[in-house]
Image (cartoon, grey):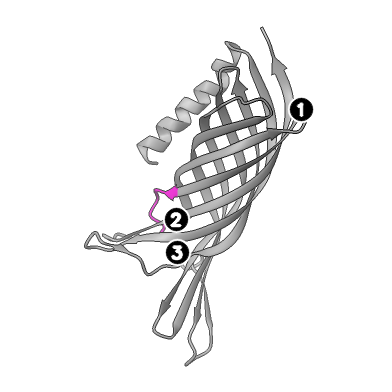
Amino acid sequence: MNKAVRYLFLVVVAGLFILPRQANAQSGITIDASQQMTSFEFTNSAGNIDNSYSPIYSGAYTAGYTHVLDFGLYFNTAVGMRNAGATMTLDDTHLRWDFRYAQGKLGLGYMYDLGRFRPYLGVSGYYAKLLKANQRINDPTRENINYDLMEAGMVNEKDYGLLVTPGVRIAASDFISVYTEFEYLMGLQNIETGASNQEATNMGYSLTLGLSITIAKKEE
């Protein structure tokens, strides 16, 4: 795993277990759903980025836990499912990749208190396990073809990377908040298998709507 992601995980885990014992804090569970735009970033053997891929639109959902300290620093963790993939057109042939991942993430950020409105910015590391990887080839000169890339061993069954998440939380009551956030996903794992000088990684943008339920408040 990339060192930056590993160090981020260690900092978040330490924060979840140490800082909440030393400061006023608020804990809550979160559930959300996202509309995603995903694609691949492909770098060929010459080190040039190939812009032939086009995005696809899909969904994701997560359930998580957030711990907010009284001075605005927060830590969060979540698990969920997300889809990924891309499309490409070569002459009259259309190719589409559809992936599905089970994903866990750990992150930290800062939330600014403006009363009912709390804008925030967070950074997370994620680790994902591939559940499905299909490729469809639509060629007008022959019958359409579907490949199971996992069964063929042509894709890496793990993925990890970084998430950057600006958003805003709006309090509906003392214990219920709704939030919306934008998220940028930057994959750091080559999704192709085998020894090669080329690399393809996941990338994506998403818009999320969610609900946060406060389950504990601590005051000293």
Instruction: Work out whether residue 57 or residue 4 is closer to the camera in this orientation and state it.
Output: 57
Q: Which residues are magenta?
A: 186-192
Q: Which residue is mark 2?
A: 202
Q: Quadrant of the C terminus?
A: top right
32 is higher (above) or lower (below) than 49: above
Amino acid carrying mark 1 in the image: Phe
Q: Which residue is mark 3?
A: 153
Mark 3–mark 1 distance (CA, rounded to whole Å): 47 Å
Other residues around mark 2 within 10 Å, as few (<14) / some (14–19) / many (≥20): many
Q: Earlier in the sequence, mark 3 or mark 1?
A: 3
Residue 76 seen anywhere in this rendered image of the structure: yes
Residue in view at x 56 percent, y 42 percent: 104
Task: Pinpoint residue 49: horizontal percent, then vertical percent.
Answer: 30, 61
Mark 3–mark 2 distance (CA, rounded to whole Å): 18 Å
Mark 1–mark 2 distance (CA, rounded to whole Å): 36 Å
Q: Secondary structure at mark 3?
A: loop
Judge depth for marks 3 and 1 and give the one in front: 1
Residue 193 seen anywhere in this rendered image of the structure: no
Residue 75 in the magenta stretch? The answer is no
Q: Secondary structure at mark 1?
A: loop
Amino acid carrying mark 2 in the image: Asn
Q: Which residue is mark 1?
A: 175
Q: Looking at this rendering, what residue extends furthest in the front direction?
A: 114
Q: CB under 8 Å between callouts 3 and 1?
A: no
Amino acid carrying mark 3 in the image: Gly
Judge depth for marks 3 and 2 and give the one in front: 2
Q: Earlier in the sequence, mark 1 or mark 2?
A: 1
Q: Quadrant of the N terminus?
A: top left
